[in-house]
Amino acid sequence: MGLTAAQVDHFNEHGFVAPIDVMSAEEAGELRRLLEEAEAAYPEHLHAEHRNNIHLVLPFIGELSRDPRIVDYVESLVGPDIMLWSTVLFAKAPHSGSFVSWHQDATYMAVGPHNDVTAWLALSPSTLESGCVSMIPGTHKSGKVEHVDTFGEDNILTRGQEVQGVDPDTAVHIELQPGQMSLHHPWVVHGSQPNRTDYRRIGIALQTYMGADMRPTRGPQYVTHVRGAAVDSSWIELPLPTELCAPDGIANRDAANKSFADILYNGAEQRRKL
């Protein structure tokens, strides 16, 4: 299984491809149940300000990161040797003001050359009304563009980074049902609006799957191995967890999150808590 030639062409032309069926709505619902049980059991490790790199403390998310139903599609774009840089849980409460400003994933990542792709898996309906991801097609072809730090309170992004002058009328809204995912290019401009529904909008970004030729340009940086060739020694490789929020997993996640923050906040005037 993998992307069709038409899907690869669409990705190359527009910077994204969606929807891609990964699993049934029932299986996505089970993942959601496990996630929300973990949030309730470990609130100090899984809360609104602490949702990065959850694959390092939650075994079922670690397993998800290597699920062939996701990785086979990724391989169509980055090749057979794959590692994962991070994960982010994007959960918007009902009728919350939380949003994601127009941005590019790659701008602050300090990695290259860019042979990578982000997978975004829906665990609840992700619609325009609930604040789905919206893409500005073709913007990946321009490479890195300037961002302005806003540090907006409701902006989910680390520093409220925002690309100015985006015409929202050109956006394509990536509506997904539970169990569906999108794949997007590290340079495509994208964002999302607040959740105006009565339900919690939940998605997991596997950000980003990288080919074996990728290297950190500022570090140290941490990755997990997904498939194929061994991870190059320029990275620090971390294991996936076998227990929920175990001490070794928490320590690994803390190290990765510190590196994650140091990279994403490089040059910023202020920081949020990890």
Image (cartoon, rainbow, N blue to C red):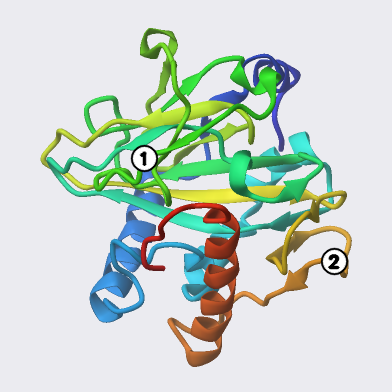
N-terminal of the two: label 1 or label 2?
1
Q: Amino acid at mark 1?
A: Thr
Residue at screen point 67% across, 77% down:
239
Q: Amino acid at mark 2?
A: Ser
Dot 1, how many residues are within 10 Å of its Cα: few (below 14), some (14-19), or many (20+)?
Answer: some
Query: Percent from the top left, x then y, of residue 128?
Result: 28, 25
204 w.r.t. 193: above or below: below
Residue at screen point 88% across, 60% down:
229
Query: Residue 102 falls in which quadrant of the image?
Result: top left
Query: Residue 7 falls in which quadrant of the image?
Result: top right
Query: Percent from the top left, x then y, of residue 93?
Result: 19, 49
What number is the disc on residue 150?
Answer: 1
Position of residue 174 in the picture relative to residue 83 (left or right): left
Residue at screen point 76% across, 42% down:
75
Position of residue 12 in the picture relative to residue 105 (left or right): right
Count of all numbered marks drawn on residues in the image: 2
What number is the disc on residue 2?
Answer: none
Residue at screen point 29% across, 63% down:
33
Residue tagged 2? 234
Residues at marks 1 and 2, CA–CA distance in whole angstroms: 33 Å
Q: Secondary structure at mark 1?
A: loop
